[in-house]
Amino acid sequence: SVRGQGDILTEDVTRFWEAFDALAGAKDHADSVGIIRERYLEAGSEGLQRFRKVRDLDPERYVEAIAAAPAFWRSVRANTLNAGAHAEAIRHVLDRYEEQVPGFKRPKVCFAIGRLSTGGTVSRGWILIGAEIVCADSTTDVHELNAWLRAVLRPTSQELAFVAHEAVHTRQRKGPRLVWGYLTHRLLLMSHLEGTADLVAREVAGITINEAVHAYGRAHEAELWAEFREQMHGNDISGWLYQGPRSTDRPADLGYFMGERIAARYYASEPDKRRALRVLLRGGAARKVLRKGGYAGP
């Protein structure tokens, strides 16, 4: 397995704050955009270049995000510059996955600064982490942010949790069944992918992610299942996944919870845990996992 500093990159965080400081000398808006583009985005590591591709990290949006929340950015700076502090713990999580998850290939991890739009994602053997979200804690000033972001940012840093969740996504298998599922029962499929990542993080690495979502879910499981069951064989995910600030009456992303419940029931019912993991990590196995595990509410 990979060792040394090359497997966990934090250089882009340092580069961002150098560009951030240079904004003080910007002549106008266009100059600010140019500083972020040239000194941060274009100067970034291979990891940041992948992040830009999968998450549309546009310099205009950075300048807007920085102007909209100056107290937030000032208060989160020191934590993000300390992003490498959990490197050994991260390597330990990846060690556990290598030992216990069939076919797991160790990814590289890149901590960078996003524009408050994503905590983590993956790209071909890379885990890409938005340090401004995952490194926030109780010392971070969130008063300028919307309600969804205030809920996403937790009182303690979430570096390990996000890496543990995203690492599972690097192992999930694509294939024709996944495409078919996306076209025919997208809500069940996407909830399976996200919920399985939460389940594996907990079962293999002992790490809970999305605690607020799961706490709400457990308290309302029966009614959530009744609602999810009616919708899961359709393609509308808007009430369950990735709705961000649009979800006002309950937490966003409750599809993670429903997917995790369905996967957990299957995992508990299978005596051969390695085989169970192999099935869970097949992207197209959502219907099989529901049927064989027999989840039918709490």
Image: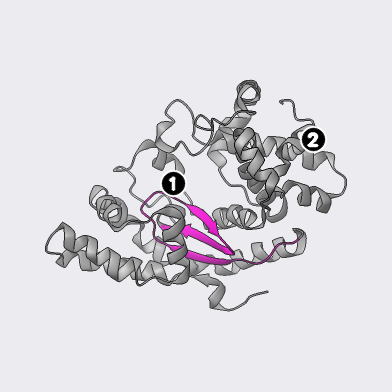
Q: Quadrant of residue 270?
A: top right
Q: Going 83% across and 39% down the picture, which residue do you hit?
A: 269
Q: Is residue 105 magenta?
A: yes
Percent x, y of residue 24: 17, 64
Q: Is residue 246 magenta?
A: no
Q: Earlier in the sequence, mark 2 or mark 1?
A: 1
Residue assigned mark 1: 153
Q: Which mark is residue 176?
A: none
Would you say residue 283 is visible in this rendering? Answer: no
Q: Amino acid at mark 1?
A: Leu
Q: Amino acid at mark 2?
A: Gly
Q: Farthest residue in the bottom direction? A: 4
- The residues bearing labels 2 and 1 have C-alpha atoms spaced at a distance of 33 Å
Q: Which one is in front, 166 or 4?
A: 166
Image: 18 above or below 210: below
Mark 2: few/some/many CA within 10 Å (<14, 14-19, 20+):
some
Percent x, y of residue 271: 88, 45
Q: Secondary structure at mark 1?
A: loop
Q: Going 25% across and 55% down the picture, which residue do you hit?
A: 63
Q: Quadrant of the C terminus?
A: top right
Q: Nearer the viewer, mark 2 or mark 1?
A: 2
Residue assigned mark 2: 293
Percent x, y of residue 107: 61, 66
Stretch of the chain drawn in magenta: 103-131
Mark 1: few/some/many CA within 10 Å (<14, 14-19, 20+):
many
